[in-house]
Amino acid sequence: MIVALVDDLLTFTRIEGAARAAGIRVARADGPAELPPPADVELLLVDCGTHLGAWGAGLAAWRSGALGSPRIVAFGPHTDLDAHRAVRELGIGPMWARSRLMRELPALMAAAAR
């Protein structure tokens, strides 16, 4: 399963469309407390543009309890250097610009479908 922590419905719609094209399921969550068990998640996409400060510790804790740690890709504005630094310090991602995520969606979904 792919899970997206995103507020922006346009972004989620694009993620959902790429997942559907790859034949896989994607769910949306509003925060770390709503995430399914890590063992059920192949890929977690996190929009860090707004919530990283509030979500960072929860995401790190969620991931640390997982065997095989699900892949997390954080994304947000390419100019948000504080978010890029926080993602690195928390060890929860790579942090990509939103534009890169949109370009990479088909490949991410294809990899998750395998």
Image: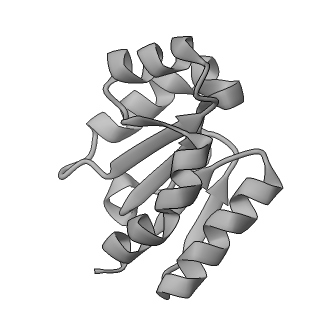
Residue extending farthest to the left is 68
Give the color scheme: rainbow, by chain, secondary structure or one colour: one colour
Residue 15 found in image quarter:
bottom right
Residue extending farthest to the right is 9
Rendered position, 47 above or below 22: above
| Residue 106 image point, x, y percent | 48, 71
Q: Is residue 9 left or right of residue 57?
A: right
Rendered position, 32 above or below 108: above
Q: Nearer the viewer, residue 80 or 2?
A: 80
| Residue 12 image point, x, y percent | 71, 59
Q: Residue at x 35, y 71 (%)?
A: 112
Rendered position, 48 above or below 85: below
Q: Residue at x 60, y 31 (%)?
A: 48
Q: Residue at x 36, y 32 (%)?
A: 92
| Residue 70 image point, x, y percent | 31, 52
Rendered position, 55 above or below 75: above
Q: Is residue 41 left or right of residue 26?
A: left
